[in-house]
Structures are given as structure tokens and as C-alpha cells.
Amino acid sequence: MTGNEAAFGLDRPFILLGLVPLVLFACLRVIRDRRYAPFLTPFAGRYRLSRLLSWVFPGALLFALAGPHWGLQQRIEHHRGLDVILALDVSRSMEVRDLEGAARLERAAAVGLALAEETEFRLGAAVGRGRGILAVPLTEDRAGMASFLESLGDTIYTGRGTNLEALVDAAISAFPDNFPSRRIIVLLSDGESLSGSLARVAKRASDAGIGIAAVGIGTESGGPAPEDGTISRLRRGDLEAAARTSGGIYIDGNDPGAADRLRSYLESLALERESGSRRWESRPRWRLFLVAALIALGLSKLCMRKKRRGPAFPAAALLLIPLALFYQSCGSAAGKLLVVEGNFYQAQGRGDEAILAYLKAMEYPEVLPYAEYGLGAVYAALEELPAALARYDAAAGALEALPAEGHRELAYRISYNRGVALFWEGDFQAAAAAFRRALELDGGRVEAKRNLELSLLSLGQEEKKKALGEGPGEGQEGLDALFRYLDIKEQNQWKSREWQEEAPSPGPDY
């Protein structure tokens, strides 16, 4: 470790520009106070000290806001593992049967199916021909992913036009950017692209920290396209270049062991990512300046207090009073600061740091329910709904140990967000109960009323299907189910844009 590594630095140095008007204003006050110096003789020393401390207070606050840091601390990085998106080329060229009588699309689906059945990390799928579309968001539902891949053998999916750039862009957009998991796109294609640039999108993927594992499907000698007999060939060079640019790997999809090789490669990345790593980073010191500002404010008030007759009070003891007050409430203040810190990191999309701050805050009983709720919110943002529900339940249990009067807003948020998580888990009855509880706490919240109605409607539709003896997805073709799902997602986005934003709550925001 060198001296440069531990050097003083600021996260937001521009904030210190606020010192300029502060110093100018202080100088004007000093000039003005000189006029009244004769009248301040009895307590001139205390007055000057109080005035000085009153200017230290905003100055220290500005330094705290600027984010000072120096020294080093070791940080252990914990990672989620691996997220994989299968990017499937479904253009007409994938119907070419140059693989011992099998179509390229069938071979691509078989490789993806083997991956879905024998791996444990989250998978998603994007399909593309003229444009790319996210067909299956990242999920741990192996059966659903397998069902989708099995349906790909039908040529109804394929169509004219090929744009691998749009396909990979759709896959990139499927990854959440608020958690540092290792992200890989498995591109299953013959490499032919009539529009777009595979090289350009591979560079974008590399810049985003996303690797491309390109699986070449087809032969370099090629075969005739079904409609016009045009010879379609595997563009191995283009796929290898895309994999190389993004830091990925190229795999010959025609090899019988292609699926095993791909699985081994991905599992090696998952193990490497889950092992965690240690790195040195500069230690934040803003809390020191915040404490200094509070002490300066307290001393500036004490300096001007009128002396009382009686035993002499040591002047040094004045310095201990604000320190004693600070350390008396240190536990509560430190816990709240950690919760606020977690909220800040969560708003910035830095999920790992938010989780760490909330875990530290859980050591303070007075903020335990807020820390548990914050963890639940992070897990919900990461789509880890069972973990989010467990944290919401823990927050509700911890809240029972605190006075109900001052924490009504937190109780509402726990019930409301618990209802949202239950709804997306498909437990509409429990979701409706959670929204009812939220409305009991605050009956004027429109979002809770709206979601209660939506839960009841969904519950009614589910009971109607059970009464008619219909299973989930029964009587629907694979393509119809896919585009109906996508249509519902578009409608939900339209509804969310149509509804007006609720007024901000006056309650605490931690």
C-alpha cells in the first residue's frame, strides 16, 4: 500500500464552492462586529468564540456533504453468481437442414434445452429475426423455460429478415443493472445478419461488462433455404469475432458435446463469481465532519449562556457535554445513519452496498424493522420475491416491539410491498389481505385501493378457471401464449404511465 492509495480525496468537490460565499459573509460580519466592540467588552472572548464556532458548523457540514475520504479499508465483495440470457436467432436461415437432416433451429433449441435442464443459475430468453424481443425474463423456473424451448421447433416462429444486433440488444436489456452478477449472453445463431452490426453490439456488450458465448449453428458448406433455395452458410468468423470482442467464447454448435462444453464454461464463471473477492478502497470520513459540525453548534450555544453563581465549572467540561450527548444517542443515531446510507445506495442501484448497510443497521434494535424492510425492498428489486417476503415478515415482527404511534408509515409500507410481492408470486388471496391491511393503516392511499381491486379480479379469474377445469396455459399454442404475455406486459406499462403519481408521504423516509 502506497501513500497515494491513502491520500485525501473528495467524492463531490464542487460542493466546497459553497465555502466562498460562506467566507465572504463571515468577513462582512467581522467588519460589522468591530463597530460594536466597545459594547462587547464584558463577554468579548466568549462572543468571538461563539461566532467562530457558528461558522465552523456550516463549513463542517459542507465538508461532510463533499464526501471526504482517506486511509484504506478492505472490502469483501459478495456476488450473486451468474445470469444467462439465451439469444435465439429465429430467422428463415435457421430452417436450413444442413445438420444431418435436422434444422438449425432444432439444434439451437436442443442446446438451450440441455442448458436449462442441467444448470442452477437464472436463465432468460430473447428471440429475434428482423427485430429482437425479450421472450422470457430472467427466471429460475426450469419447467417454464424448457416448455418455451421445446416450442421453438415449430417453424411458425421463423420469419424473414435477420438483425443480430437487435437480438443481442434485446438480451442486454434483460439484465438488471442494480446488482453485480456475472452476465453472459449465449448467442445461438448461424451468424448471418441482413441488417445491423454484430461487431458493434459486441463492443457495447463488452463496455457493459457482458460476455457473449457464441454457439455457431450450421455448416460452412451450407444448405438451401426452404423458400428460394439460396445457399445459407455458417458465418463462423463473425461469431468468433463477437465472442472475442466481448471476452466470451466460441463453441461449435454442431459438435455433439457442445452443450456439455457450454455448461462447463458457464459453471466455471458461476463458481469464480460466487467465491467473492477482496479489494482495498478509500475509507469514507464524512461522519467525522458531521460530528464536528454538531459539536461546534452545541458549543456555540453554550459559549453565550449566562454564568451562574456557585461552584466553578471547569471550562474543559464544556467540551465533554456535546460529546456525552452525542455518545448517549450514538446507538440510535448510528443505526439511523446506516439505514439512510442503505437507502442512498439502493436509490443509486448499488444493491450489494445497500445490503451491507442494512445488515449493519440490524445491530441496533431501535431501527431493526427499518433495516429489515430495506433488505426486503432490495431483494424485491432483484426479483428475489421469497427472500423479500421473509424480510417483510421479519420487519413486521420487529415493528411490534416499537411504539405503534411513530411508525405508522413503515407499517403501511410493509403491508403494501408485501402485497405487491405476493401478487407477483401468484398468491392473489394473500396479496388482497395484505392490501386490505395497508388500507386499514391508511385508507386514503389510492395505489393500495387499486392493487386490492386488481388482486380480487385476478383471484376471481383464477377461481373461474378452476371451476371450468382449465389448467394454466391449457388450449394455447406456444406462440400465442408468448405474444399474449408480451401484450399484457405492454398494457401494464401503459396503465402505469396513465396513472398519476401519488403525493409524497409526510412520514419518515428510512
Image (cartoon, rainbow, N blue to C red):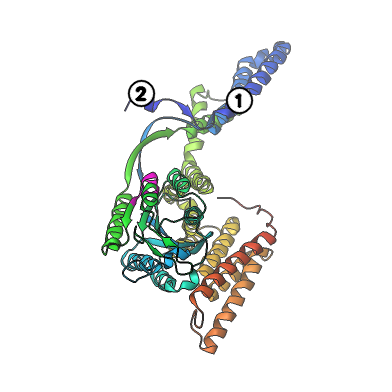
Who's the residue at 66% across and 53% down the image? 504
Residue 437 - label: none
Q: Is residue 467 above or below residue 2?
A: below
Instruction: Assign the N terminus to one quadrant of the image.
Output: top left
The outermost residue toward the bottom is: 468
Residue 17 - label: 1
State the image quarter where residue 295 is shown. top right
Q: Residues within 10 Å of mark 1 (few under 14, many from 20)?
A: few
User: Is residue 243 on the magenta stretch?
Assistant: yes
- Which type of secondary structure does the marked residue at label 2 adopt? loop
Q: Which stretch appears magenta?
A: 242-249
Q: Position of residue 450 (x, y in %)?
A: 65, 68
Alpha carbon of mark 1 to alpha carbon of mark 2: how far? Answer: 27 Å
Name which residue type carries label 2: Gly
Can residue 393 be spotted in the picture?
A: no
**Label 2 sits on residue:** 3
Name which residue type carries label 1: Leu
Q: Position of residue 332 (x, y in %)?
A: 49, 45
Can residue 289 be spotted in the picture?
A: yes
Q: Is residue 78 above or below residue 75?
A: below
Q: Residues within 10 Å of mark 2 (few under 14, many from 20)?
A: few
Q: Position of residue 369 (x, y in %)?
A: 49, 56
CB-based contact (under 8 Å), mark 1 and mark 2: no
User: Is residue 285 on the magenta stretch?
Assistant: no
Instruction: Please state which of residues 434 and 280 is positioned toward the viewer in this rendering.
Output: 280
Q: Is residue 298 above or below residue 243?
A: above
Instruction: Please state which of residues 414 and 11 is positioned toward the viewer in this rendering.
Output: 11
* Magenta span: chief secondary structure: helix
